[in-house]
């Protein structure tokens, strides 16, 4: 990896690390019911939601009740997203007139988004209307991510309280996570993305003519708002088919850095939230350090693509012999027959090398196995060649074959 690549990784890691402590403290205060700078804004909304849902925020739940509430909420979410897709052709905010999504695709998408796996088996701009994208997928990006964070907080409470019978209230954790954490961060990130060139509108697709005179349809829509929560919630369902590889989702290098930062910032900050809630921040930093080591170790792993130290073994050639790189100091067997003939005489004795052989002739190894041939490793021999040292039994046609390691 180049120095420029390491600098970019260091900058990205620094941006994430700087946000760990302040965001971790903020999330701990939110889930512990303490006052934050957003309390004057969202506290009235929170109380209203509790009143509508009949939730007593001071009443905590046993872990079984907590789990059942989570499962029931996920089932309702699944049914809502499935119904929106199947009724898409009858619903508004569908300027392209897209029809109903197929039953199998609707089922797959609904299950995927309800479980926060967000596996996208469809092309967003060619399959989903604006209403389904906003009321279905974007909402699920919020609540499914909030569900996952709420379960993490319940687990942290289990560590912190030890012998307590309750782990919190699922509905309270879900509401607070959405109102105080995901929604404000998504609003800010949406405005930033819009400023960088990501579209956010309800207009119809644009018909354009290319320089060659061809017709092209340019998709647009409420993309920025969905991308923001897609990144913050580590979700997968993008507005466009190729997600953040699309220039309308990720226009430039700055937007790319911000979207990458958004993927990890909440997950990284939850480590400090853990440390604060268990009254030992060193444990939180220890978890974060382990995550950082695993992250930094990733780019240095060897890959089959671009690996210089080890060559990938080629497939057998259709002919009877497979050449390799020239051996400068080798005097070896040279094939003078066509591909249909064998380099071994009927008597079983190898053909004697001729004086006209050049040192730069490719080093070859012929294996008498199903008429297939495989290359030997590069040889490094002396100037002289002796026919007596040729080992016809192994099929190696190189002199001093004890130094010739077969790879077949």
Image (cartoon, rainbow, N blue to C red):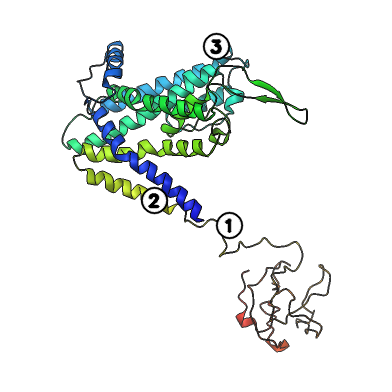
Relative to the observer, which residue lies in front, 319 or 122? 122
Name the residue beneath numbered marker 2.
294
Q: Earlier in the sequence, mark 3 or mark 2?
A: 3
Relative to the observer, which residue lies in front, 278 or 183? 183
* Residue 220 pos. (x, y %): 59, 23
Element carrying mark 1: loop
Left or right: 73 in relation to 120: left
Q: Earlier in the sequence, mark 3 or mark 1?
A: 3
| Displayed quadrant of residue 408 | bottom right
Element carrying mark 2: helix
**Disc 1 and disc 2 in contact, CB within 8 angstroms:** no
Q: CA distance from mark 3 to mark 1?
A: 50 Å
Relative to the observer, which residue lies in front, 110 or 14? 14
**Disc 3 and disc 1 in contact, CB within 8 angstroms:** no
Name the residue beneath numbered marker 1.
306
Left or right: 324 in relation to 117: right
| Displayed quadrant of residue 48 | top left
Mark 2 residue crowding within 10 angstroms, few (<14) / some (14–19) / many (20+): few
Label 3 vs label 2, nearer the camera:
2
The disc placed on residue 223 is none
Name the residue beneath numbered marker 3.
91
Q: CA distance from mark 1 to mark 2?
A: 22 Å
């Amino acid at each position: 990896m180049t120095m420029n690549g390491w600098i970019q990784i260091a900058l990205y890691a620094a941006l994430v690390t700087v946000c760990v402590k302040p965001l971790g403290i903020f999330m701990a205060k939110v889930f512990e019911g303490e006052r934050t700078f957003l309390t004057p804004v969202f506290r009235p909304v929170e109380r209203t939601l509790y009143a509508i849902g009949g939730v007593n925020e001071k009443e905590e739940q046993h872990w079984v009740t907590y789990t059942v509430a989570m499962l029931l909420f996920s089932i309702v979410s699944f049914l809502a997203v499935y119904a929106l897709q199947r009724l898409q052709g009858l619903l508004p905010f569908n300027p392209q007139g897209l029809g109903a999504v197929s039953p199998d695709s609707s089922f797959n998408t609904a299950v995927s988004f309800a479980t926060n796996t967000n596996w996208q088996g469809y092309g967003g701009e060619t399959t989903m209307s604006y209403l389904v994208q906003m009321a279905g997928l974007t909402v699920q990006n919020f609540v499914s991510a909030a569900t996952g964070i709420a379960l993490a907080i319940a687990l942290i409470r289990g560590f912190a309280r030890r012998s307590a019978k309750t782990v919190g209230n699922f509905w309270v954790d879900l509401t607070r996570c959405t109102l105080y954490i995901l929604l404000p961060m998504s609003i800010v990130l949406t405005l930033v993305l819009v400023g960088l060139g990501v579209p956010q509108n309800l207009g119809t697709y644009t018909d354009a003519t290319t320089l060659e005179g061809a017709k092209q349809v340019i998709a647009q829509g409420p993309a920025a708002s969905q991308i923001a929560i897609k990144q913050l919630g580590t979700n997968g369902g993008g507005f466009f088919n190729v997600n953040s590889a699309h220039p309308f989702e990720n226009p430039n290098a700055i937007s790319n850095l911000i979207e990458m930062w958004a993927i990890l910032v909440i997950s990284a900050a939850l480590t400090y939230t853990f440390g604060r809630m268990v009254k030992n921040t060193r444990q939180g930093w220890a978890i974060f350090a382990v995550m950082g080591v695993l992250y930094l170790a990733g780019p240095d792993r060897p890959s089959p693509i671009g690996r210089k130290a080890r060559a990938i073994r080629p497939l057998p050639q259709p002919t009877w012999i497979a050449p390799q790189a020239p051996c400068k100091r080798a005097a070896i067997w040279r094939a003078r027959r066509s591909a249909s003939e064998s380099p071994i005489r009927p008597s079983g004795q190898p053909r004697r090398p001729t004086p006209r052989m050049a040192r730069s002739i490719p080093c070859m190894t012929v294996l008498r196995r199903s008429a297939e041939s495989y290359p030997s490793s590069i040889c490094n021999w002396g100037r002289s060649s002796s026919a007596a040292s040729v080992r016809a039994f192994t099929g190696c046609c190189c002199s001093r074959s004890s130094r010739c390691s077969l790879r077949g």
